[in-house]
Amino acid sequence: MADPHGFMKASRSLPKRRPVDVRIMDWREVYEASPEYSATGVREQAARCMDCGIPFCHGGCPLGNLIPEWNDLVRRDDWKVASDRLHATNNFPEFTGRICPAPCEAACVLSISDRPVTIEQIEKEIAERAWSEGWLEPQPPQSLRGKSVAIIGSGPAGLAAAQQLTRAGYAVTVYEKATRLGGLLRFGIPEFKMEKWTIDRRTDQMSGEGTQFVTSCNVGVDMTADQLRSQHDAVLIAVGAEQSRVPDAVGSSAPGVHLAMDYLVPANKVVGGELDQSSIDAQGKHVVIVGGGDTAADCLGTAHRQRAASVVQLDIYPQPPDERDDDRSPWPSWPWVLRTYPAHEEGGDRQFEVTVEEFVIGDDGRVRAVRLRRVSVEKDASGDRIVNPVDEPFEIPCDLALLAIGFEGVAPSPILDQLGISLNRGRIDAASDWSVGLPGVFVAGDAKRGASLVVWAIAEGRAAAAAIDVYFSGATQLPVPVRSGSSDLR
């Protein structure tokens, strides 16, 4: 039974972030390690959970995490059982505890009249306690099924499916085109948000369970689809949605104008020791970031650490309110509020209701400025966006423009051509059992649902693993996330 008065005794608090002037000098995570917070503060925060009669946090979480259960276990200092309950629904809580935007917190009942429970931070603390105590040893299967599964892509969807299937007794091989595992977890997310030893630690556990990893293998190029299918009894496509969206502004292909991922990936490789230097560096430059989401904030923090001369972030939409607007986004829906990331504390200018009309090219052929225009954004009767200019164009200096306006879907790939798979609005269509219309071929993650959250990717991977188990066995004992749409698998 939860403490019925816990939310009245303590207010929401999180560990302190490292001082801005200190943390921009390195690439380490922004939060300070706080043994005192880990020992007592987390339990106090967990006690704020009211154990609601209807836990809306469950509905907010794509994985259906058992949040009130492990909150109360932490409150009672029963960390081992809390870890067991957390890992019952989430393969990688150390990832989601760092980079998930926490839709569970938006749905927290306490947020109706107060600030929500610090669910994401508690999740991270449980995971880190489990690792430090040695509770997360490899769990190899007790018996083998005699069937082999290939997984293309080592992002969170592919890794989650791989761990579930390996533990169920299948021989799983994960193929990754990059030199290291993790997909955009490793190469798209900066170190200051999630240090990459967290990925290595988990994949080491998976190797100990029997999962095989093959890196630097671009399936469709280094190995054909026929070769892959001849070596494995089933294939799961988990290649993500890496095709970036490009604006139609004049000059968007000029030198000095880059897609966000073309900037972040080499920057992360430099930090990871894979490159000596990146060909795209913000040092001493006037940087303009087009976009207002997570990826834009990643570019912002990276530019600060590369010692940009100035950084301006542009968002076409109006500035959201600081608090939830009950008319526009009533509880427990995802709130339309201003999201301020740690990177915004570090500097830079943030402008709303502006659109790029042109990337202005200098005499040297490179971008020298961005021509902007103030706008108002409306939606017509069909829900389509209408952008109306409200002022005269103006320019701001720009030596480096970074485009972070989202992703269109799956990037072109020879493996899709070889399998005869076409895209539907950038995604791979799948039946309710995650199959793509070819015997033994399945899809999961962003490749199936479009660019989304890491927590959705893990949920998709777990659901696809259960679907593959049904394909081979006719039934499954693997858990299926409630919100995955796979309740009919059994």
Image: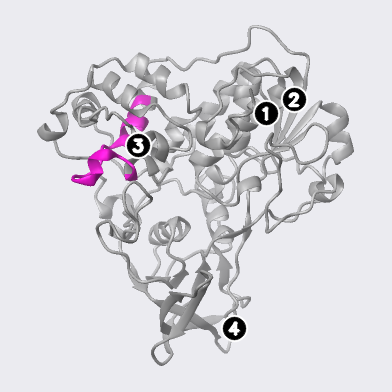
Residue 181 visible in image: no
Q: Position of residue 18 (x, y in %)?
A: 26, 46
Picture quarter with the N terminus: top left
Q: Is residue 48 located in the magenta-colored stretch of the structure?
A: no
Q: Amino acid at mark 4?
A: Val
The residue at which mark 2 appears reads as 471
Report the front residue among 145 and 40: 145
Mark 3 near mark 4, Cβ–Cβ under 8 Å? Answer: no
N-terminal of the two: label 3 or label 1?
Answer: 3
Residue 119 is inside the magenta segment? yes
Which residue sits at x=35%, y=37%? Answer: 56
Q: Secondary structure at mark 3?
A: helix
**First reached walking from the N terminus: tag 4 or tag 2:** 4
Q: Is residue 192 visible?
A: yes
Mark before the other along the chain sequence, 3 or 2: 3
Q: Which residue is mark 3?
A: 56
Q: Amino acid at mark 1?
A: Ala
What amino acid type is highlighted by mark number 2?
A: Tyr
Residue 80 drawn at (x, y percent):
36, 14
In the picture, the disc for residue 332 is none
Q: Which residues are magenta?
A: 106-126
From the image, state whether disc 3 or disc 4 is nearer to you.
3
Q: Kindly identify the residue that appears in the image at 55 percent across and 15 percent down.
A: 138
Residue marked by disc 1? 467
Quadrant location, the C terminus: top right
Vertical arrangement, residue 426 with respect to residue 63, above or below: below
The residue that mark 4 highlights is 250
* Real-space Cα separation, disc 4 to disc 2, in angstroms: 50 Å
| For discs 1 and 4, the disc positioned in front in the rendered view | 1
Q: CA distance from mark 3 to mark 2?
A: 33 Å
Q: Disc 1 and disc 4: Cα gap in Å? A: 46 Å
**Residue that extends furthest to the left in the rendered view of this protein:** 9
